[in-house]
Each structure stands twice: as C-alpha cells, then as structure tokens.
Image: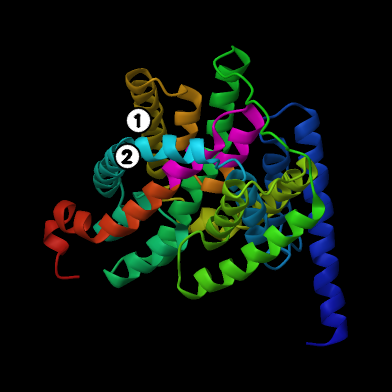
Amino acid sequence: MTLDRLLFDAGRMAATAIAAAIGGGVANAAGIPLGFLIGAMFATAALSLFNLPVAVVPNSRQAAQGLIGIGAGLRLTPDVAERLAGLFPVMLASAFALILAACLISLAINRLTRLDPDTAFFMSLPGGIAEMAVLSERYGGVPGLVSIGQFLRILFVTLTIPQIVFAFGRDGAVQPEVPAPHAEVLWLPLIVLCIAAIVLARLLSGKRVPNAWLLSGIIAGAGAALFEWHTAVPLEGLELAQIFIGISLGARCTRAVFRDGYRFLPANLAGTATLVAFSTALAFIIGRAFDIDTISLVLALAPGGIAEMSLVSGQIGADTVLVVAFHLVRVVMVLSLAVLLRRIFLPKERDG
C-alpha cells in the first residue's frame, strides 16, 4: 500500500471519527439515552447514506467491546458470582423462552414475505450476525439477507430499549448502582488488564469463540476483581467506546442495505418489535417472581447486542454483570440449539 493511500485512508478515518464524535456529543448534550453511541451512529449513517467517504478505524469496535468487558468484569466480586450462579436456571429458562418466541416469529416472517424458510429462520434468531449468516449459508439460506436482518434487529433494539429503560428510570424504577469499592482509576493495573484481554481475545478469536473481545475483557476484569486487584475503567473510555461502536453500526447503514432489505424490512421490524415486547413482558414476570430488579432484566433479556445493553446498564445504574451474564447464556444457547430448532420448526428443510 502506497503512502498516499495510507494518508487518504487515515484522513477518512479521522473525518468519520470527528463527525461521529460531534454527533455523539450533541446527542449526549441533548440528554438522549446512550447519546454518544446513538449520535455517532446517526452521524456516520448520514455520511454513508449520502455516499460520503466513511472509514472505520481497524479493530476499534473490538477494542471498545474489550474495554466494556473489563468494566463489567471488574464488578464480578465473589458475592456477585455466587448470586449469578443461583440465577443460572432462570438464565437458561428465559433464554429458551426468548429463542422459542424468535422461532415462531420467523414462521410469521416467512409467511408475510417471499423469503425462504432458512433465511427467515436464521434472520430472526437473537444470535450474532456472523454466526447466523454462516449457519444460514450451510442450510441454503441467503447469508447477505440474514446479515441485513440481524443488523436491523440490533439497530432497532439499540434505538428503542434505552428509551424504555430510561423512561422507567426517571420514574424511580431504578436506583443508581452503588459504586464499587476502590473504584479509582489506577492506570498500571488497567493497562495490564488491557494487555491480558488483547492476548486472550486473540486466542479466542482463533478458536472462533463468539464475542471473543467482550468475553476476554470480562474474564480479565473478573480475574482482577476476584483477586482484589482494584482499578476502574474511566468514564471517558466508555464514552469513546460508545462512539466507536456507533461508528461501526452507522457504517453498515448503506443504501445497499435498505435496497436489498426493503422487501422484508416491515416484517423484520414488526418481528423485532414483537420480540422486544415479549422480552420486556418476560422481564417483568421474572422480576416479580424472583425479586430481581426489573429494569436490569429488561436489558438482560433484550434481543440486542451485549456491548450496547451493558453500556445502557452502566449509564442507568442497573446490574451490569447480570445483564452481561444473561446475554452470554442466550448467545451460547442460540449457537447450541439453532440446528436442532431448525429441524423442529422447518421439518421439510431437514436435508439442507
């Protein structure tokens, strides 16, 4: 690659980052929940939709996920770990209920659109974009359309769930989280944790573990917390993470996405809205039954991205560790059960 090309790409990345930072700052100043992420996403999407040059800093989303993971992992004290272990059956049951609801929604999308059953099925499951696209291709679906549908689901949830939980939060449904003891930012331990998370993420990525960067950050942070090695992630770091995630989401909002997805866009959004309504209702039921903070459960059961929901959790003072734990269990269950559920819900497609 020539020097001119490197300078050109660097200029595009810088211009995109500046526009995203301005958008995020304006949205945050306006009091929009998850403002840095949503503002950065809209600013980047606007550039992309107007065919202006957009460039994402390489590995910036992964780095942001790792930093968010460290912040969540640092809260995993022995007491918190014991409480989460007791909730594991609830995590399994709620994830299974959400996955079954998504399977039923996929049947409706298949009927309402001309999408083939496998594309509709893997598009509807609340799993990772890449993982669902790969599975759909294996069974004869259209991976490009699955990726678009999965992206639109994450986009919809990212835009709606923060508004829902902040509306409840302002009414006093959520009390701000008590700061963790020794929450002072100690830079040397934090740098060591970042290095450890990067090394682990490289190893897990090589094994194709989903959400490898976020998971590595959680493991590194949890290890520090369990051994009482105290530090914290600075607020500015989490705000920067929001901007980078917003850029990566906004850069996907191309004209091609809406051109290729226009046929199923209404059905996809309706299906996602139904799944959000179901997960929210389920959160209220479980919260009442097991005396768990309802708003934390709304975020924990939301069919969105782990990083985005954990950021909202941190902003509103919900239980971030619980949110991340529920999401990780759901992701593992989706990947473990997807093929079996396909055979059950798409019996005529068994031989794919």
- Of the 4 image quadrants, the one containing the C terminus is bottom left
Query: Is disc 2 surrounded by few (<14), some (14 to 19) or many (20+) residues within 10 Å?
Result: many
Which residue sits furthest top? Answer: 171
Look at the image and give the residue range highlighted in magenta.
Answer: 309-327
Q: Measure the C-alpha gap from mark 2 to mark 1.
A: 8 Å
Q: Is mark 2 on a helix, strand or loop?
A: helix
Residue, disc 1: 278
Q: Is residue 290 left or right of residue 213?
A: left
The amino acid sitting under disc 2 is: Leu
Is 276 magenta? The answer is no
Q: Which mark is residue 299?
A: none
Image quarter of residue 220: bottom right
Residue, disc 2: 98
Measuring from the top left, give residue 170's x and y in whole percent.
Answer: 63, 16
Can the viewer see residue 269 in this picture?
Answer: no
Image quarter of residue 268: top left
Is 311 magenta? The answer is yes
Can the viewer see residue 5 in this picture?
Answer: yes
